[in-house]
Amino acid sequence: MRVPNSYIWDNVETASRAALEQLQLERLREGVARISTTVPFYRRKLAEAGVTAGEIRSLDDLARLPFTTKSDLRDNYPFGLLAVDMKQVTRIHASSGTTGKPTVVAYTSNDINLWTDLMARTYAAAGVTQADIVHNAYGYGLFTGGLGFHYGAERIGAAVIPVSGGNTKRQLMIMSDFGSTVLCCTPSYSLLIAEAAEDDGIDLKSSALRVGLFGAEPWSERMREEIEFRLGVAAVNVYGLSEVIGPGVSVECAAKKGLHIFEDHFIPEIVDPDTYERLLDGETGELVLTCLTKEALPLLRYRTRDRTRLTREKCACGRTTARMERVAGRTDDMIIVRGVNVFPSQIETVLLQVGGIEPHYQIVVDRSSDYMDELDVLVEARAEFHGNQDHLTQLEKRLSYEVRSALGIACNVKLVGPREIERSEGKAVRVVDKRVL
Ligand code: DLL
């Protein structure tokens, strides 16, 4: 494995904590003043909380500000939370969330410029330079991965190949013919690429590939070892979410001791997911992010639902910015299957709409030997249908078809006999995630 020479793109990342926090405070005050006049939702929320921008005297006052949740975005679908006129919007993305309507996010040209800078800083932390050839296999489209990684690579002056996802054999051909040195994709897709290479007798370890920027789904240290071993790359963790900007919220440096948050643009907090109380550095809870500089969609205290913890100790790399531990999971029941956000409640809605079943089901996610996620839904058919094989086969087909169309990803519904799904006395176990990350 070749160790990347991580570097720092913007010196703000090594500023003193005092200077950084002063900058955050000024930006927070300006931001709150602006949204309290431009976004009716925040005008109301801030009035309810009884806070004005002028009363924000220290960063501790952040705790007095209202939270924003995914349902606030949904309730104001598609553009109700915008802080600018639609004329100033130059880009729209949407998250893969499949609970009914997608979560829509918008950018002004300054926002795109900011995002591009943050992605340049992301690449720099991963050791990517102008000399690199970046193979960008994140999906291009409404998903923020493709274009986010694309613009950032251009800003640092690397040569970017906008290959997007899918067609793995062709990816391998391009990678070897074009001499790609950097791979950008989800960690699970990188392992699928590795397996396809092994099948074709291609040794990626002796290829030009040297660094991978992986994110958009949870992955473990064990998975990192596997990726580094099979692809011969240094695997770097990149975190972000559409609502806040896309990828480019935080990234690992060469020290790999947590992901540095771009704190000059986002203030991180950790809260207890049940009481919403703020937790201390080192304590695990839900990550909450406040956007300081975005124009089109500057969210206040956005509850990410991602579980992690923070440290503000200076890193060996020289950066002083807060670091978050790799995301350990979610505080809600969302699962990410093949990069698509899936909520059990949404599967339940479809099953119950189709009917002919008991409301007892279990969602089983597994990862096959070729590193693709597989989604099965086990559900009990109504007792009166048992023994009627023709009817059961038809019902199974219909349910599979309806769930697939609602989620937009492959899925099989399997009918099981009466009382085969284990009952629980407490919370029902709806999701069985068998994936070994
Ligand atoms: O996944 C943005 C992104 C693209 C990040 C490419 C990194 C690389 P969404 O589709 O809105 O945006 O999904 C955001 O994905 O709240 C996390 O639950 C999860 N997630 C993203 N990055 C990581 C990561 C993009 N490095 C949701 N580790 C987030 C664990 C991650 N989970």
Image: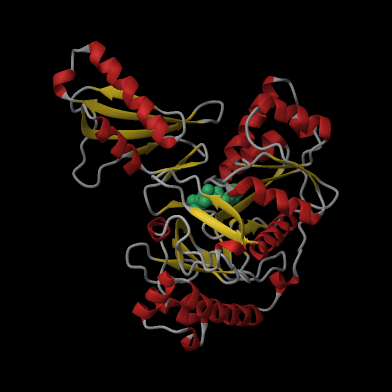
**Outermost residue toward the front?**
87
Whether residue 214 is visible to the viewer of this picture, yes or no, is no
Q: How many marks?
A: 0
Above or below for 86 versus 28: above
Q: Position of residue 87 (x, y in %)?
A: 59, 62
**Outermost residue toward the right?**
131
Q: What residue is at 56 percent from the left and 80 percent from the top?
A: 30
For residue 227, side relative to residue 159 (left or right) = left
For residue 277, side relative to residue 7 (left or right) = left
**Which quadrant holds the N terminus?**
top right
Q: Position of residue 299 (x, y in %)?
A: 50, 66
Q: What residue is at 26 percent from the left and 30 percent from the top?
A: 354
Looking at the image, what colour scheme do you see? secondary structure
Above or below for 344 versus 322: above
Residue 226 or residue 387, whichever sits in front: 387
Asked which quadrant contains residue 28, the reply is bottom right
For residue 168, side relative to residue 124 (left or right) = left
Asked which quadrant contains residue 9, the reply is bottom right
Q: Where is residue 31 in the image (x, y as percent from the top left)?
A: 55, 76
Above or below for 367 versus 324: above
Above or below for 427 versus 324: above
Q: Position of residue 158 (x, y in %)?
A: 81, 49
Q: What residue is at 73 percent from the left and 21 percent from the top?
A: 201
Asked which quadrant contains residue 359, the reply is top left
Whether residue 170 is visible to the viewer of this picture, yes or no, is yes
**Outermost residue toward the left?**
384
Q: What residue is at 72 percent from the left and 68 percent from the top?
A: 318
For residue 105, side relative to residue 406 (left or right) = right
